[in-house]
Image (cartoon, helix red, strand yellow):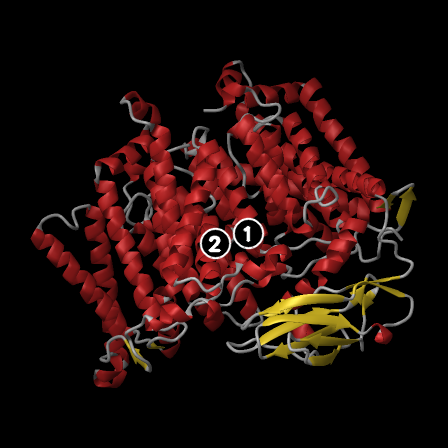
Amino acid sequence: MDTIQFILNGMMREALSPQTAAVAIAVIGLNIHFGFTGLLNMGQSGFMLLGAYGFAISISNGLPMILGILFGFGAAFIFALVLGAPTLKLRGDYLAIVTISAAEIIRYVGRSALLVDFTGSAQGIPGSQYTTGFRNLSFFGTGSFTLIPFNYTDVADGAAWVRIIGWIVAIAVIVLIVMRFRSGNAFKGLLQSAGMAGLLVFGVLLLFFLFPVPYQSTGVSGWWVRFVAWGLALLCTLVVFLLVRSPWGRLLRGIREDEDAIRSLGKNVFSIKMQALIIGGLFGALGGMVYVLSSSVQPDSMGRSLTFFCYTALLLGGAATIFGPVLGSVLFFAGRIGIKYTAAAYVPDSIMSNQQTEQFSYIVVGVALMLIVIFRPQGILGNKRELRFNV
Amino acid sequence: MRRGVAGLILALLLAPVLALISSGPASAVDTLCLPGPDKACIAGTIRTEDGPLADVKLTVTDEAGTATEVTTSETGKWNVQVEKEGPYVVKVDESTLPKDLVVDTGEVTVAAKFGVTKPALLTIRTADYSASTSKFDELVQSTVNGLRLGLLLALASVGLSLIYGTTGLSNFAHAEQVTLGGMLGYLLINQHGLGLWIGGLVVVILCAFTGWFQDRVLWQPLRRRGLGLTQMMIVTIGLSLALQYVYQYTVGARTVRVLQDNPSVREFGPVTITNQSIVAMVISVIVLAGVGYALLRTRIGRATRAVSDNPALASASGIDTDRVIRLVWTVAMGLAGLSGLLYALVTNGIKWDSGLQILLLLFAAVTLGGLGTAFGALIGAIIIGLVVELSPVLGMPGDFKYATALLILILLLLVRPQGLLGKPQRVG
């Protein structure tokens, strides 16, 4: 029982982590590229790294935070223009190869010994150089707290049956929420929307009741960073929701389905693709800035693997859906930690050493990515009819 | 003693930085400097191309002129913690150096910053080591190295290009097949003591079998299911991730070698090259020529090119496309395995992510030559190999040699998107 509680607590911590939120934001951007427009951007980590560098380098050189954010976005904007101009007129594979190459170039340049005074080369820029201003903005005060003070230990001294019932209810609520989303009319009508929102809030509270996690209020990786990161993730979700409902959003889907049809309507396909690339890239840059808020800017932590993880998260949650990126990121990171902890707890050391559990979890990630694409390309929330795109 | 001049200079420059990054538990005896919010560190390693130098004294002087003295450890490492940000002058005390050493850079200025360890790069070399090789000699040596890399890349990228041509798939897991060749070489030849030639043959056959097997259980069923190419490409990404961590799981994160002993070296005028490299280049040329001959002259080779050109038409004219594709997968994976084995032999080892590092060079080679054209891939690979090895000689900073190759790819796509040998109508 305690082992299971330990594993689930670990998954909860990972799910709440600001880096999960950061990846979720980057995946939201990737969803605009890949999910809605059908652009095969394999360099989302490059956008993230540029955002992080723009943010961290300007602040550690004494510029105010707002300028740092603007520089981060500016770098990603220019990157998108430079990448898009030669490739958006070509077939999709070219965009994939050029974006992955360009993202790698950014990483090589970042870790070059020549730029050590700006980027700190391979060691990167430590968080202490640029996060002070952000932490000073916090109105959470000092000390530490759990999100809701009332948790399972307060009911019958945290007996096993309380937790088991709690877990069953939590699973039921999550399944219900997912089913409502999949039915596609989760937010139609005032009554349904209110019911859905209530269900979501109840689910979140229930999870906090079952897996209480204490953090510092404003520390390096405390509630303040988590609050801002998840707040931004939800805000981005809302922005994308509004964007894809607009006429512009319909054009994106149109380009994904049949580029020539849109062209024959007199639309400038190249320009719309470019806009999508830029907007998705800006989300990526924002994700990069959030990613480094609780750690440091390390070029090697934002390499190809991160882009591949973004794709796994996106396809898991469901490409071309509104909540897919957030759901996918949470499930991806929490699931990986769950696999790792489970393997560490139940597989004897003689078969799998502690270090091997980490690698084992990534093997599972790779295999899972293959299985999702083969057997459930629409992910958890997606609609199969929407995902017949091809480049 | 003119071994890889450019590489050596690069190694000397990067050694302190790399030493800092990799200063894990192995160097626990060294005193450690941890930078904090109001503390900065300056650190480095004093070494020649023969090894680290212990007990060398250095002085670190701040702007006000206050000097701190520090001595290098057993492993040649040193570090200083300072309480103020700003420029510091690091100077090596030449009287504490062993004899017969030449100091290239004995004094550097480092800008200390709180929370960071700044490296101070000092270069010292032995007297008989001549850094002043002529530019021409350097150029010749790098050209040979570039050709060597290019040939190895060509072995892998011809297969990648054939797979792309016949199935339309960009195989991201191709690089892991390259790693597989090296890893199997390590397991069979190094661990289980098979002879190099026999072991090498077994490695190539095993790798070719993985290609046959993959197509049998994975790619052919997926083609039959009508899975889109984008989706298939993401499947290859998943496969590549899984394979990488399988290598790390079984062999570990260290670099492993196929042969333990150091290879003997030959000199041809300005060029120094190991015997293994010569053999590797000869094997590559023979195998590539064989593949070229098969493609141009044999029945099955013509069928392959026909499928590559237009699968529907080839199928309609009685070619069994599935059989051709199966053969292409088998041959491509065998070539990739051979490339990995040779790569591990000539570069002194292979690591779980070695393939990942050359994946982009493979893609660059294939795209440069023209997606789907086998001979284009060959030319592209040679060009990429030469660019990677020659760019440091021609003035690019050494860190950027891979970046240069990728940059050339992007620039070429601007002017000639179909690649060197591609046909324009291939571009959608």
Q: Amino acid at mark 1?
A: Arg
* Chain of the residue that carries numbered disc 2 in the rendered image: A
**Residue A209 image-quadrant placement:** bottom left
Assign the C terminus of chain A to one quadrant of the image: top left
Give the left or right position of residue A329, taking residue B159 as reference: left
Q: Look at mark 1 in the image and give the residue it sits on.
A: A107
Give the left or right position of residue A179, taking residue A30 as reference: left
Residue A225: x, y in percent? 35, 68
Q: Residues within 10 Å of mark 1 (few under 14, many from 20)?
A: many
Give the residue drawn at x 33%, y 75%: A213
Give the residue drawn at x 69%, y 19%: B296
Q: Is residue A109 visible?
A: yes
Assign the N terminus of chain A to one quadrant of the image: bottom left
Give the residue drawn at x 63%, y 19%: B302
Q: Are marks 1 and 2 in contact (CB under 8 Å)?
A: yes
Judge by depth and name the residue closer to the eye, A228 or B339: A228
Residue at the top extreme of this rendering:
B317
Q: Look at mark 2 in the image and give the residue it sits on.
A: A49
Q: Which mark is residue B330?
A: none
Q: Is residue A311 visible?
A: no
Give the left or right position of residue B108, taking residue A21 as reference: right
Q: Secondary structure at mark 2?
A: helix
